[in-house]
Amino acid sequence: MINSQNRLDRTFHISLLLKAADSVLEIIGGLFALIVSPSSLNHWAATITQYELSKDPHDFWATHILRATHDFAGSGRFFAAFYLLSHGIVKIVLIIALFKEKLWAYPAMIAVLGGFIVYQLYRISNKFSISLTLLTLFDMFIVWLTLKEYKRHRPTPDPQKHPTPTTDPR
């Protein structure tokens, strides 16, 4: 039978693996943003949406894909690359450190994900996105798990070195 601490550890490790996979995809996406030319991306988007748009010029998905690739072609390309690469690299470094149980990584992960959560909530408040909402909830869950794990791994103060003050009964 698995005790609750083992379940919590297993959940924490699985969550970190999922976050690592997300980080690797962000790094790949960031590199893709730098490597693929905007004209190639626009051509690719036009090719895959051509059939749908010929049937319905207002097709929801096709128009959104074309709009996204058009926005990407401008200054959005370098912002997307920077955003994805920085997020992916920072998170993957922290996840590796967490798997090695480096104490500094626990508060660092909490702070980094906390910053991402604030930014994601800002984005959601401007334009609702179910995928960003789910990602934000997952990040909040990882922050909670990381906090629990940090409390478990953090060294406890030695009572011999730091005695607790006693109250004088006088």
Image: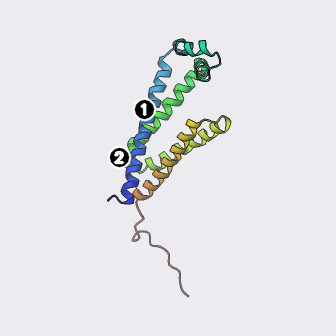
Depth check: give the residue in front, 146 or 89.
146
Looking at the rendered structure, the secondary structure element under dot 2 is: loop
Of the two numbered discs 1 and 2 on the same chain, state the one appearing first in sequence.
1
Residue visible at 55% across and 23% down in the picture:
78
Left-right relation of 67 to 149: right
Q: Amino acid at mark 2?
A: Lys
Tag nearer the camera, 1 or 2: 1
Residue at coordinates 41% horizontally, 58% vertically from top-left? 152
83 relative to 5 in the view: left or right: right
Dot 1, crowdedness within 10 Å: few (<14), some or many (≥20)?
some
Look at mark 2 in the image and give the residue it sits on: 100
- Where is the N terminus found, in terms of image quarters? bottom left
Q: Is residue 46 or residue 105 the one in the foreground?
A: 46
How crowded pointer 2 is (Cα within 10 Å; few <14, some 14-19, many 20+) is rated as: few
Q: Nearer the viewer, residue 63 or 57?
A: 57
Which residue is rendered at x = 42% and y = 65% of the image?
Answer: 157
Residue projecting furthest to the bottom: 170
Quarter that holds the C terminus:
bottom right
Q: Residue at x 63, y 38 (%)?
A: 124
Q: Amino acid at mark 1?
A: Val
Q: Is residue 126 above or below residue 97?
A: above
Q: Position of residue 119 (x, y in %)?
A: 60, 39
The numbered disc on residue 24 is 1
Q: Position of residue 89 (x, y in %)?
A: 45, 34
Residue 87's spot in the image, x, y percent? 50, 34
| 73 sits left or right of 99 in the view | right
Q: Total of numbered circles in the picture?
A: 2
Return the residue found at the far front. Answer: 55
Look at the numbered disc 1 and give the secondary structure of its residue.
helix
